[in-house]
Amino acid sequence: ITLPRHTAKQQHILPTTSKCRPPTMRRGNQTLPSSSRTGGGALQKPFIGTATWAILLVFSSLISFYAGVWTALAVAPSSLNECPDCRRSCLDAAEFGGGELGHSLEIITGRKIRKALETQCNAYESKKDSSHRFPDSVSHFANGLARVGHKELFDQYDFGVPMSDRAHKQDALILYDSQSSLPSDKNVAAQLNGEIPRLSAKDATENCDVMNAMFIENPARARSRQCLAIVGGQYQSYHIQRWMRLNSEEKPDANKPLQLVGRWRRNDGNDEFLYPKQRAIDMHQELLLTYLNHLKSTKQNLSEILKNIAINNTVIVVTANMGQSELLMNLICSSRRRGLDTKNLLVFPTDVHTKELAESLGLTTFYDDHLMRFIPKEESARYGDRTFALIMIAKVVCVQLVNELGYDLLFTDIDVVFYRDPMEYFRNPTLGNFDVYFQDDGSRQERYAPYSANSGFYFIRSNERSKILFRSMMYSGDIIIACRSHQQVLIALLEEYNSLFGLTVKVLSREEGDFPGGYH
């Protein structure tokens, strides 16, 4: 490399030794370092030229720029996770202007960065949308949640229990135990901080091969703090355990630990299940022994009567003692006054005097002294006294015998008055095919849950399920006598057999006006 010519004599830069010492100049007989040169004469040539420096500068800038872009992309996911509005904010971060490389380079690199960040943001949003409402620790029984209108759910599925009068203002919850049971609307798996989606009953259950329905209420909401524990991964149970905090006197005490109690235990601590005492046990065993010893002849005699009076294999059954004779007369006279046919009405009198009275009214009777000799002749002084309890036994006996012989029946207490023929209602083909139909009692005590079925008016279809139900009632006479009511025993068996083998139970609505009931 030569320097530009500055004098007449051309000077040369001679190579140095292999140790690359700095280039030198000569002045006369003295050799001088180039750094000591002053004034005119030949100048030292730079080791790297100006053009080379420019090229290196451009390449180093490009390398630094792309290294920065690569670093930004590498750290982008962690930044996205911390960003509350990730998609918008991370895309805005790519909008920059100007720079040393010029406007065209900004546009090209900006497009590439934007595309890469958009891919990252979409992936983050997808992950966010698909996250589960429930953690993995409960995924064996909880994978989604949806709301359904209370009334709409009852309209879609006739559970048979009386519907709450607040149903039109309430929602029910549906919990999905697997991903495959989720409806097509996957919002049921939304994030924990999202609103629980509200679906139609049909859509919410479209992928449910099995649906377990549970009915809960806190009858003492103002005084009792109630919790619901759902334990997954256990052997399936179709019953609810009830736990309460009680002291040694069996009264509610918030300072005591929770303990297992029966479902007839009220929130004030009182237990409405009364254990049979020996007197009730002995009476029931004697009655049951008499019943079984005479069952064959009893069924033969009753069968002949039922053949003669049944209409469409259906009869109306009542029972009465002498103390209720005026009520029996009122039922018959009011029915005939309205032109209702009493041909298929069968009276089970508990004494001879009531038998003679009924027959004098032109009614068909079936009287068996062996079965009815345990029943008092006088009326009960009050609800739930001993006479009342024994009359309840007579109700069970007459229904069980007719049902066992294969006849459908309508049982009614004799303090009821018919305005229209009730059999027209139960013969209606649009009614449905429930095994048993009950009037709504109206009371919502724990001992009547969940049906509040009125045992003074009900229709029974004779089949294997209903036969098991009323045979079990016959064998529960000691509890009926102890509790002074067969209603709560009947409801307990309705619930058990509905769960055990699918006995279908329908409680008729009080709101429709056909069967209003007497509870106010």
Image (cartoon, rainbow, N blue to C red):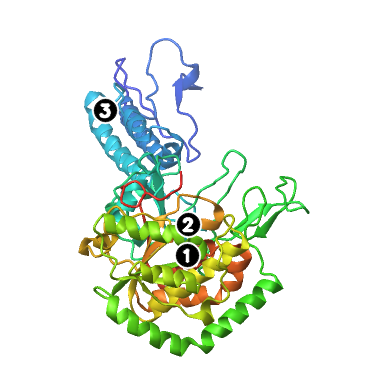
Query: Element under label 3?
Result: helix
Q: Residues within 10 Å of mark 2 (few under 14, many from 20)?
A: some
Snapshot quadrant of residue 308: bottom left
Name the residue rendered at 77%, 52% in the picture.
Answer: 249
Q: Residues within 10 Å of mark 1 (few under 14, many from 20)?
A: some
Mark nearest the camera among 3 and 2 is 2
What whole-number distance in Å separates the C-alpha atoms at marks 3 and 2?
A: 73 Å
Name the residue rendered at 72%, 52% in the picture.
Answer: 246
Residue where numbered disc 1 is placed: 495
In the rendered view, does 365 fall on the left or right side of 230?
left
Q: Tags 1 and 2 in contact by the CB under 8 Å rule?
A: yes
Residue where numbered disc 3 is placed: 106
Of residues 110 and 183, the one drawn nearer to the viewer in this rendering: 183
Residue 351 in the image, given as x and y percentages of width and height: 50, 72
In the rendered view, does 352 fall on the left or right side of 150?
right
Residue where numbered disc 2 is placed: 450
Name the residue rendered at 62%, 52% in the picture.
Answer: 266
What whole-number distance in Å separates the C-alpha atoms at marks 1 and 2?
A: 7 Å
Residue 385 in the image, given as x and y percentages of width and height: 61, 59
**Which amino acid does the dot numbered 1 rest on?**
Glu
